[in-house]
Image (cartoon, rainbow, N blue to C red):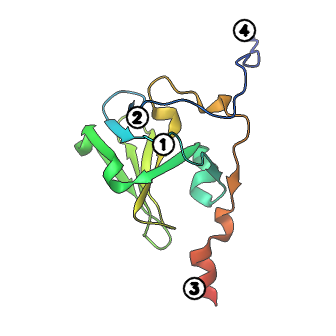
């Protein structure tokens, strides 16, 4: 059986409109969260570090106080590696990455834009890729 896929025909955009407080969840719905986005999605991006390269998520960041887990905090699993500064959270049931506390700025959470209700990050026209392979904290250690 051959399945023929087609490319998405959704128009590409420079900006995605979001609610001032936008709801999000993992794939199975066990983890639900709210994120305060009064200024919209700030600097959506990808990263090429060993973790982000594998998960491929488009993320944006907010202050820690602006992301709240509404349901399923006990379902979240934590993964840390290298310096153990960043805290990567994912649903232990469906495996979807929801957010992480950033290594480069632990006062911020980066969150998976694809987890936001009604949002498709693949329509964003230009999504920069940050150079996480050459992270500033790694350069500081080797100096």
Question: In this rendering, would 1 be left or right of 100?
Answer: right
What is the CA distance from the residue labelled 2 to the residue labelled 3? 39 Å
Mark 4 or mark 1: name the one nearer the start of the chain. Answer: 4
The percent position of residue 63, horizontal first and vertical second, equals 39, 55
| Label at residue 1 | 4
Mark 1 or mark 3: name the one nearer the start of the chain. Answer: 1
Nearest the eye: 143 or 54:
143
The percent position of residue 78, horizontal first and vertical second, equals 36, 54
* Total numbered circles: 4
- Quarter of the picture containing the C terminus is bottom right
Judge the density around disc 2: few (<14), some (14-19), many (≥20) Cα neighbours within 10 Å: few
| Label at residue 13 | none
Asked if labels 2 and 4 touch by Cβ distance under 8 angstroms, the answer is no
Asked if labels 4 and 3 touch by Cβ distance under 8 angstroms, the answer is no
Marks 4, 2: nearer the viewer: 2
| Label at residue 39 | 1
What is the CA distance from the residue labelled 2 to the residue labelled 1? 8 Å
Q: What residue sits right under mark 2 in the picture?
A: 20
Judge the density around disc 3: few (<14), some (14-19), many (≥20) Cα neighbours within 10 Å: few
Q: What residue sits right under mark 3 in the picture?
A: 141
């Amino acid at each position: 059986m051959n399945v023929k896929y087609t490319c998405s025909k959704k128009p590409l955009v420079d900006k995605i409109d979001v609610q001032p407080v936008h709801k999000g969840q993992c794939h199975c719905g066990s983890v639900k969260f709210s994120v305060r986005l009064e200024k919209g999605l700030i600097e959506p991006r990808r990263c090429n570090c060993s973790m982000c390269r594998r998960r491929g998520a488009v993320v944006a960041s907010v202050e820690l106080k602006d992301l709240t887990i509404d349901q399923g905090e006990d379902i979240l699993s934590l993964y840390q590696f290298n310096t153990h500064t960043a805290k990567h959270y994912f649903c232990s049931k469906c495996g979807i990455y929801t957010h992480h506390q950033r290594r480069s700025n632990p006062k911020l959470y980066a969150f998976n834009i694809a987890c936001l209700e009604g949002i498709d990050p693949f329509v964003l026209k230009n999504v920069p890729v940050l150079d996480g392979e050459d992270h500033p904290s790694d350069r500081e250690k080797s100096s």
